[in-house]
């Protein structure tokens, strides 16, 4: 016994001699339930840790005493002093009782900078977040910026819906990054053993001759088909009266039936419906029983009110009861988003889903409909549910999301993923991130809280910065610059893990002329320019002739989606370019030089 005590004493002395002190503890809620994945900020070393699946944590400190700040979606942030010799029992309070302290999370953030309050209004009948575009940033004052990696693609198909109707698009419905990443451009499989591959391209800017475009392309590892985990899917289907239209419930039924045909025997499906009442329509059923599942979907009919809150609670309960450890546990919510019974605000639903996602269940949202479509609500649910969001405007889009891109949509390889870049002011005078805009409320309530996103298997995410080179930096195509434009890194968590992973990358200063760049990068720039025109951004002067020239030089017309994009540009010009002068018959107009 004395030997053991002596060993322990010597261990503590050795730890102190090395200047390291091991702090241990646990995090629970007010009902004494363990809280996993709590973000723990250690003040002395300015580093983040996360609590484990049982709420416990262990942190090596450099001093006997320190300060921790703990935060978790759905709970009040808490700062506590700690001493390494004391087991920390920390309780976080639910935001239900402290709603006024709830902080909106940002999609992108520039360190230590406050943004202007500039935003667009919503249109009647449909709700969209009021977005504040990212501004031009002085790289000397604010070199650090970051943004959330996500795979949402709802904005593109929603924009397509408006243009096909011959209608202008609400500016806040246009999210440039979702339009660009709808196409999954320039995907490159990461090297073996890596989760992400990060690459960069620098080109001249076709719409601002003294600027350049920096493309950061993140490719996520593809899960091999034979390694896809067993899945526990809960279809949460809105069958309320508002869904009784051809492009709502009938479209969803066809979409889910296509999805079911690709299920494996080891997968299982449950169906929860809500319309007037909430009910379990189909108990957990093996993917081997496809006829049973398909028949159950076909029998769905629309009627009643929309008790979305109660439906979400039921779906999460079903998902938890059938949870597959190390599997893919996911709710697929399909609705027009028009909840009208129970809690209906984005804020209340956000708190509900933020708490429920701690169970390890992901939430994918599929939106349908028009006129009363609630884009803001579905965007909130998907983000806080640690999932993704798509809008189905037709059966072809349903097939794209649920069949062709099944693994990208339904199987996560990383969560809480953030890409950060620190620009080199010696080479970059200023920069502006195109897209990844924040909602107005987030900017008003929080200045630095950046929330990462879920990334699905095989996804490519492109971010585009418009930069102004520093004077005298010789950042030109003919110059050789030894230093990098900046240093980038990706921060993420593996599914079910609490250890933060990091991928570092040096951004090359090598410049290409736009018309000599990779075809898919040129197309990404074209889509982003189109998005800025539709958004009526003050950062460009719309030039439809230039846009059409960019489409002609970059779009691959042999690919259906890119050919369709070309048609959407034509449709948009007819709507927006009302002062367009008709060229005389037989007279050719020279295209802009790119």
Image (cartoon, grey):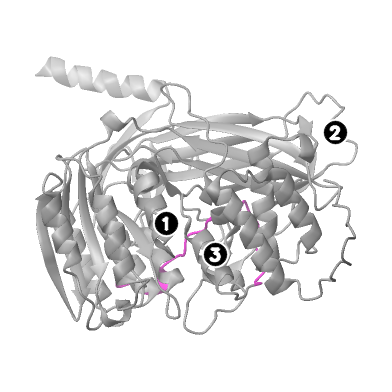
- 452 up-or-down from 31: above or below: above
* Image position, residue 545 (x, y; %): 80, 59
User: Residue shown at 77%/40% (left/top)?
Assistant: 514
Instruction: Report the residue that reaches farthest toward the top.
Output: 3
Q: Which residue is mark 1?
A: 396
Residue 331 visible in the current orientation = no
Q: Give the Cα distance between marks 1 and 2.
A: 44 Å
Write the start and end of the magenta stretch as one range. Answer: 94-118
Find residue 64 and name its label: none
Residue toward you, 486 or 278: 278
- 129 up-or-down from 153: above or below: below
Q: Does label 1 or label 2 sit earlier along the sequence?
A: 1
Q: Which residue is mark 3?
A: 160
Neighbor class of circle 1 (other Cα within 10 Å; few <14, some 14-19, many 20+) is few
Q: Dot 2 lies on which element?
A: loop
User: Residue shown at 76%/62% (left/top)?
Assistant: 539
Residue toward you, 176 or 359: 176
- Horizontal relation, residue 224 to residue 122: left or right: left
Q: Give the Cα distance between marks 1 and 3.
A: 13 Å
Quarter of the view holding residue 250: bottom left
Pick the quarter of the image with the N terminus.
top left
* Image position, residue 579 (x, y; %): 81, 75
Q: Which residue is mark 2?
A: 476
Residue toward you, 467 or 394: 394
Does the magenta portion include 568?
no
Q: Give the Cα distance between marks 2 and 3.
A: 37 Å
User: Residue shown at 62%/47% (left/top)?
Assistant: 145
Q: Does label 2 or label 3 sit earlier along the sequence?
A: 3
């Amino acid at each position: 016994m004395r030997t053991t005590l002596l060993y322990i004493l010597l261990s503590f002395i050795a730890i102190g001699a090395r200047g390291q002190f091991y702090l241990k503890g646990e995090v629970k809620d007010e009902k004494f339930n363990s809280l996993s994945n709590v973000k723990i900020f250690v003040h002395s070393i300015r580093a983040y840790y996360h609590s484990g699946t049982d709420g416990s944590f262990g942190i090596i400190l450099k001093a006997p005493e320190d300060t921790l700040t703990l935060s978790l979606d759905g709970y009040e942030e808490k700062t506590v002093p700690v001493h390494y010799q004391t087991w920390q029992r920390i309780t976080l309070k639910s935001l239900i009782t402290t709603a006024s302290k709830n902080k909106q999370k940002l999609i992108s953030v520039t360190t230590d900078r406050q943004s202007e309050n500039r935003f667009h209004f919503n249109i009647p009948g449909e709700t969209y977040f009021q977005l504040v575009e990212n501004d031009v940033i002085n790289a000397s004052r604010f070199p650090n910026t970051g943004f959330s990696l996500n795979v949402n693609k709802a904005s593109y198909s929603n924009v397509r819906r408006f243009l096909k109707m011959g209608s202008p698009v609400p500016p806040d419905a246009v999210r440039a990054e979702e339009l660009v990443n709808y196409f999954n451009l320039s995907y490159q499989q990461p090297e073996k053993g890596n989760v992400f591959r990060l690459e960069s391209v620098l080109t001249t800017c076709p719409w601002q001759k003294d600027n350049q475009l920096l493309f950061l392309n993140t490719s996520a590892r593809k899960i091999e088909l034979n390694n896809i985990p067993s899945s526990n899917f809960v279809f949460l289907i809105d069958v309320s009266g508002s869904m009784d239209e051809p492009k709502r419930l009938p479209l969803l039924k066809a979409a889910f039936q296509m999805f079911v045909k690709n299920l494996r025997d080891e997968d299982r499906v449950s169906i929860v419906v809500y319309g007037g009442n909430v009910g379990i329509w189909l108990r957990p059923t093996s993917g081997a029983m496809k006829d049973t599942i398909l028949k159950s979907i076909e029998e769905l009919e629309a009627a009643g009110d929309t008790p979305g809150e109660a439906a979400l609670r039921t779906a999460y309960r079903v998902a938890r009861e059938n949870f597959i450890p190390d599997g893919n546990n996911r709710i697929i919510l399909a609705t027009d988003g028009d909840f009208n019974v129970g809690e209906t605000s984005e804020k209340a639903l956000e708190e509900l889903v933020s708490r429920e996602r701690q169970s390890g269940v992901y939430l994918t949202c599929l939106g349908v409909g028009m006129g009363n479509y609630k884009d803001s609500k579905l965007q909130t649910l998907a983000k806080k549910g640690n999932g993704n969001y798509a809008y189905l405007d037709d059966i072809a889009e349903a097939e794209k999301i649920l069949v062709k891109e099944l693994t990208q949509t339904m199987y996560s390889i990383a969560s809480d993923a953030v890409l950060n870049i620190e620009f080199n002011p010696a080479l970059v005078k200023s920069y502006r991130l195109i897209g990844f805009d924040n909602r107005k409320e987030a900017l008003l309530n929080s200045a630095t809280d950046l929330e990462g996103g879920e990334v699905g298997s095989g996804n490519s995410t492109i971010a585009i910065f418009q930069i102004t080179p520093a004077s005298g930096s010789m950042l030109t195509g003919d110059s050789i610059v030894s230093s990098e434009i900046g240093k980038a890194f990706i921060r993420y968590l593996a599914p079910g893990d609490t250890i933060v992973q990091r991928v570092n990358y040096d951004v090359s200063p090598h410049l290409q002329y736009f018309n000599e760049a990779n075809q898919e990068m040129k197309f990404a720039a074209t889509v982003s320019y189109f998005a800025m025109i539709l958004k009526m951004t003050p950062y460009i002067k719309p030039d439809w002739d230039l846009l059409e020239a960019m489409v002609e030089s970059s779009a691959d017309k042999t690919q259906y989606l890119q050919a369709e994009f070309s048609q959407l540009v034509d449709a948009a010009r007819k709507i927006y370019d009302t002062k367009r002068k008709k060229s005389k018959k037989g007279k050719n107009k020279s295209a802009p030089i790119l």
